[in-house]
Image (spheres, rainbow, N blue to C red):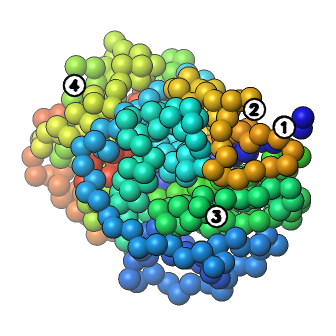
Amino acid sequence: MIKRILCIGILFALLLSGCVFNRPEPQPVPPPPGSPPAVNTPPKDSPPAKQPVAFMAKNLMDGVTAADIAAVTVDDPFITAAANFSVELFKNSFSQDGNSLISPVSVLLALAMTANGADGTTLSQMEAVLGGGLNIGQLNEYLYSYVKSLPSEEKSKLDIANSIWFREDNFTVEQNFLQKNADYYGADAFKAAFDESTVDDINFWVSENTDGLIEKILEEIPDAAIMYLINTILFDAEWASCYGGASDGQFTDVLGAKQNVQFMYASEYQYLEDDNATGFIKPYFGDKYSFAAILPNENLSIGEYVASLSGEKFESLVSNAMGEKTSTALPKFEYEYEIVMNDLLKDMGITDAFSQGTADFTKIGSAEAGNIYIGEVLHKTFITVDESGTKAAAATSVGMEAQSAPTRQVILDRPFLYAIIDNTTNLPLFMGTVLTF
């Protein structure tokens, strides 16, 4: 029997940035005609939408209208489950080989969409890992409500987009699967030839939704692939108090080598500390999101610290930030990261979904050639963190420095962990490590 792979190539594209120099304002990407509204409401001062993009693929969402979903309260059961999933995913993706960056929220959204097509033990395993006891119906409601609550403003922008791409021949998709993903995730769905034109369409869709930061995510489509489920997250925000510049310094990498870097210095006012690390929180413009930097104690390696983390410990650390003036140094950095997540998701408990013999995705649809299962989960990210060229912000920062002597100090001159957090729930939208330059 020919295997049919649910190439839920969960392809994620992420951009995070601090204040930037003369970056052109990105333009939103409109969905093809007939597709449901986006999950996030654009800011009122968003630029006019572009003309719809003409894909070779056929939009399956024509005629599918998203239902009106009542938002639920994003409460402790969801926050606890999401925090645990986020940190466990981060721990399982960490490697001493180099810098890392994942978006737990992006992975959670994409796999939850996939779980709407799962049944039996496959579904049970996905619910246990993704929801920590929440069923898929509850998870849909929570994720819809959580994403809807995430603000997006001109200087603190968060855009989330989802799309599903199906092979047009010998595959029948279940309408209920499309409807649920339209209702809760605003996902576009395309029926495509899965040839070179589809590679071009998918790469163009990803590039447009990441402002060109990730231009290509597919080289080719395997013959056995029948579906790609794609999620992109674009985060682009200025610091609430921008850096005035950067100075030369040295960073001791994970192997002990000294590397020349550019450090940005400032006083921050949210100090982090637990038994194993110190750190600080630096808010972005609008105070809806923040950058949390965590530096393990010198007697503890970055690997040992990551291994000791739990969702509860992370939440406790950032929730109990102390209002103390802290002298900080953050190196400028920029890097790409890519990881195939099959093995780490299996280690977390999602096993049947990756097996041709045991996967049950009958609620997605049926393929004439065989059973549907996940072939590859690919996660690709990009980050840049830098200073601002705004004179007023730089002057404000200098003024703060002159007020009083810092009582704390956090100098990120050796491997550290960071996260971009939503200030309302303290959940990490992104988590990464800087080990080397």
Q: Measure how far apart labels 3 and 4 are at the Cα level.
A: 50 Å
Nearer to the camera, 248 or 38: 38
| Element class at badge 3 | helix
Q: Quadrant of the C terminus?
A: top right
Q: Measure how far apart labels 3 and 1 are at the Cα level.
A: 23 Å
Disc sitting over residue 3 in the figure: 1
The residue at the point 41 percent across, 43 percent down is 135
The residue at the point 24 percent across, 43 percent down is 76
Q: Are marks 2 and 4 in contact (CB under 8 Å)?
A: no
Residue labelled with disc 2:
356
| Element class at badge 2 | loop
- Which amino acid type is shown beneath numbered disc 2? Gln
Residue labelled with disc 3:
175
Q: Quadrant of the N terminus?
A: top right
Nearer to the camera, 312 or 216: 312
Identity of the residue furthest to the top in this view: 299
Residue labelled with disc 4:
274
